[in-house]
Image (tube, grey):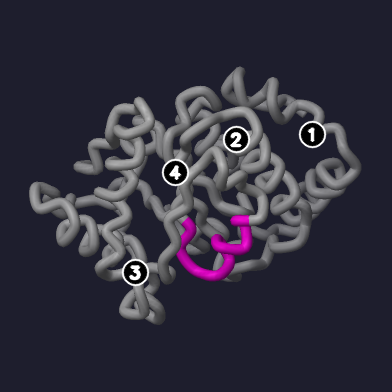
Amino acid sequence: MALQLEESWKEILKEEFEKPYMKALREFLVAEREAGKVVYPPGSLTFNAFNHTPFGKVKVVLIGQDPYHGPGQAHGLSFSVQKGVTPPPSLKNIFKELQSDITSFKIPSHGDLTKWADEGVLLLNATLTVRKGEPASHHNKGWEKFTDYAISELSAKRQGLVFLLWGKNAQAKEELIDTGKHFILKAAHPSPYAANNGFFGCRHFSKANDLLIKNGYTAIDWQL
């Protein structure tokens, strides 16, 4: 497999790529494309979260579920869409909460969160691919084992990280995280169906920065 992966993550994850579940996942993805299925994001962007946020530079981990399934949206970063694409409702709610939490924040004209990734926010979906127009279509094919391993390695080998767990699916990852070493902030999912149940008003962005500063990290500049 010709893998384009940032070097520090390649070292952490290299043995996972040789395990039977990942070989089965590769075969599944090849079969999907050979059958004419459109898979998002493009193959070159599947590991975008890792490539923008090296292992040693991670400060915050924001866990999503799976990529957006509409044309041009997904580019390998959870909750993020490419420039020129209208931000989906969940992302609009994230910006709304940010504006309430950090008064200097101005809602951007785009939904590309690459700047956060480059600053140390690992924007990691539990499942890294999806079939066009079919949310959750690549669940339970192996990606979850892979991303769980990445989260576990961050928990074991880093210190003082902030994990943002929004919604029940993300909160299920809590068991992978050593809460004696790291910080977990939990809230409802920012989707329109759940945001009023505890996402709005959670103030996770300022809280995350306060925790980072107390533990010797620089704060995230959330402005895009």
Mark 4 and mark 2: Cα distance apart in space: 11 Å
* Disc assigned to residue 154: 2
Residue at 37% x, 68% y is: 190
When the figure is inspected, residue 210 is found, relative to residue 64, above or below; the finding is: above
Q: Amino acid at mark 1?
A: Phe
Instruction: Single out the mark in the foreground, 4 or 3.
Output: 4
Residue that mark 1 sits on = 17
113 is within the stretch colored magenta: no
Secondary structure mainly formed by the magenta segment: helix
Tag 2–tag 3 contact (CB < 8 Å): no
Residue at 35% x, 74% y is: 198
173 is within the stretch colored magenta: yes
Mark 1 and mark 4: Cα distance apart in space: 27 Å
Q: Which residues are magenta?
A: 165-174
Mark 4 and mark 3: Cα distance apart in space: 17 Å
Q: Is residue 52 visible?
A: yes
Q: Amino acid at mark 2?
A: Leu
Mark 3 and mark 1: Cα distance apart in space: 35 Å
Q: Amino acid at mark 4?
A: Val
Quarter of the image that includes the N terminus? top right
Question: Neighbour class for label 1 at 10 Å: few (<14), some, many (≥20)?
Answer: some
Label 2 vs 3, first from the N-terminus: 2
Question: Which of the 4 quarters of the picture holds residue 43?
Answer: top right
Left or right position of 222 against 56: left
What secondary structure is found at the residue carrying circle 3?
loop
Mark 1 and mark 2: Cα distance apart in space: 18 Å
Label 1 vs 4, first from the N-terminus: 1
Residue 129 at x, y = what percent? Answer: 62, 53
